[in-house]
Image (tube, grey):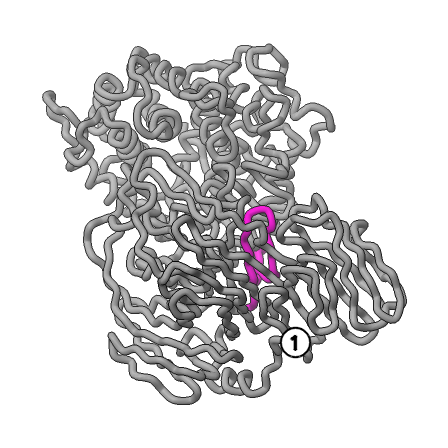
Amino acid sequence: MRLTRRSLLTAAAATGAAALATPAGPAHAATPTGTATPTGTGAPTEADVPALLERAEALLTGGDLDPADPDLAAAVTALDTAARALWETLDRSPARTALWADLAPVADPGNFGQSYTRLRTLAIAWATPGTTLTADSAVADALVAALRFTHDAAYNPARRETGNWWFWEIGAPRALMDSAVLLRHRLPAADLTDYLSVVDRFCPDADRRTNAPTLAETGANRADKAVIVALRGLLGQDATKIASARDALSDVRDAGRNSLFRYVASGDGFYEDGSFVQHGAVAYTGTYGVVLLGGIAQLLSLLAGSPWEVADPDVSVLYEAVERSFTPVIFEGLMMDAVRGRAVSRERAGDHRDGAAAVAAILLLATGAPGTYATRWRALAKGWLTRNRTTPFAALAGLPQLALAKDVLDDDGVVARERTGGLHVFADMDRVVHHRPRWAYALSLSSKRIAAYEAGNGENLHGWYTGDGMAYLYDTDDPAQFNDAFWPTVDPYRLPGTTVDVRQRTDLGTGGGTSTYRPANTVAGGSVLHDRYGAVAMELIGAPGSTLRAKKSWFLIDDAVISLGAGIIATDGRTVETVVENRNLGRDGRPRLVIDGARQPDEQGWSGRFDRAGWAHVEGVGGYVFPGANALHALREERSGTWRDINTGADTAGSTTPVTRRYLTLWIDHGVSPTGAGYAHALLPGASATATAVWARSRPVHVVANDAAVQAVEARRLGLTAANFWTAGTAAGISSSGPASVLVLRRGDRISVAVSDPGRTLATVAVELPFRVRAVVEADDSVGVTPGRRGRLTVAVGGSRGHTHRAELTQ
């Protein structure tokens, strides 16, 4: 009997209650692998395993769905189309040397890894009602034979790992176990035994890297392997394996050191400030983080209500991460590229797909989470699902995910939540996200702690400047900005927000394995006040081969982002530029560009220099105001490229078909080998040309300092002063005893202060205010306040990893 979707959801609902009901103590009731306990390391009952295998199948196919349901029919058709194409090109001849001509030789890790993935797609279509392959005996027989062929020719215990370890230990075994779940009633017993043996060879547990046994698995890799081991345990009716998969989530083996349900202070995992790091130093919420979230959600659902259910009380860390880590980096259902690492170079995995994967994982997790979490998440998901009309979820999701979304969309009791608001400085991964009602702005920073980029295995070949302060402007009217062939066509030397030494660079990551580059600077991050105002700083130190140095600041308020640069120097005899904007206009966009009230030409190839531009406006984007004396350069151009130019990966390589997009670029030329150059400009997202002109005249935000010692602005109407001190100094009457990021908001007799040390070099910093402080309303324990004619705060910033310290005072 097929498991229905409703029974799947009901079974999964046991997860949250079980987790919260477990008393405090060990990670959970289980003990290290191999020790018999009442929680599931003994022999399974006859009913346990078949029911869980039915559930595993339902997680792949969606369960007992009606293929005629109009909301699901398109997904069935999409699955059928993809599977039919694979079926018609599958080599079924006795003398074959590969399953598909483009995946030869099959013994190559990338080729057998992708072969298993394609076989899984065929198996899902065979097991799903409504496709042209459903329950077709010829298809089942061919799949059984294909699995046997791949095992004998490519993936078996006699082979040793070569190339990318991931294919051997995660990619191939996961697709193999999924296929075996779907075909379990058709597989000969001897074949299943062989497939379990190969998994035991290359993924025996989720705790260690098989090809490096002293390396403990962390983050998404641990979650992936836990799912593989759980499926292997179910297929082999091995309770010890199932228990070890569950225990791996909490890292029982190493007393919780690598538990996925704990906050970390360094390395891989979730941080309390919402950051997520993988590969030691890469901001990876949008890819590895999503994989981790999806893997845990699957195991929680799979094992719920069974003798092996996850009962770790610290699973609440994962629940909190949904809104702390994932929600801030999702914009209208899209995953921000600033947290997708080298995945931005993958043609078939754009921000909309990773966003959809995150939404799907959250929906699955909600089926078993405690009600207080699930209610909020379902409202969040409904908002994302209904607002994303450019790349709708239905066009990206499979049947199981679409069925979960349909449950939310059809439930009138779920009210779609409005767009996420707030300003987030993720100090532990050098990222900043500022959400406003109709736009969002993200910054990708880097330091000696967090990589400027990751490249490798042929991926992200042109990612040189993605962590040098790249700025992402998201607009509700232009959600396709970064997924409409942006990465293969944008000028990689002119990424918005960056200051660059224009020099020829060689491709990154062309060899095997992945690597990261961490610059030498310590300053990257800033302060947040009232979740609404921000002061962000980054010291830019050029990569090896460049002497470029710069002090960069961003001040974020309700309707504007003010960017300042100072101390820009280089001695290499090359031009240095700061890129104000580089907007993807699509295939044929011709938005109006106005500079100081004069409309500029819209022909492709046009360029112009404006020596004392006061303001510019780009139709459909917003306004740009230039309070300094920099010359503004503008360019319209068509740029062509291929996805293969930036990704040659074994299983992610892009196509060689050229794509062309139009761009409008605005930049400031600092000249050859500048000495002490600078810049200042304000971005007004969504502003009209008229509003931009008014802003430029009225100057509601004044730049009060912009040099290598301090960068600061005043928004007098708001009562806000924001400053980044690079050394001890004074700006707008505020003094700092050392490097610090400071925000001061004065309204009536109330004073709000936020302070951080984004360079993490000080133990304490003293900040003196230019006005009287009478009393402390509230303050963090790390903040000492001395009232008086000039109030003084002494902030213990040491050990706080660049996070914000706050105080509320009265005059």
Query: Is residue 186 shown to the viewer in this render?
Result: yes
- Residue at image location 17% in from the left, 30% down from the top: 104
519 versus 697 height, above or below? above
Q: Nearer the viewer, residue 114 or 43?
A: 114
Q: Nearer the viewer, residue 672 or 130?
A: 672
Q: Measured from the top left, where is residue 733 in percent x and y? A: 74, 72
Query: Is residue 130 shown to the viewer in this render?
Result: no
The residue at which mark 1 appears reads as: 715
Q: Measured from the top left, where is residue 127 in percent x and y? A: 32, 32
Q: Amino acid at mark 1?
A: Ala
Q: In the figure, residue 128 lies in which quadrant?
A: top left
Q: Measured from the top left, where is residue 2 in percent x and y? A: 41, 30
156 versus 86 height, above or below? above
Please give left or right for residue 618 compared with residue 627 in the image.
left
- Image quarter in which the C terminus is found: bottom right
Whether the magenta-drawn stretch holds residue 431 is answered as yes
Magenta region, residue range: 413-437
Graded by Cα atoms within 10 Å as few (under 14), some (14 to 19) or many (20 or more), the crowding at tag 1 reads some
- Image quarter in which the N terminus is found: top left
Q: Main secondary structure of the magenta part?
A: loop
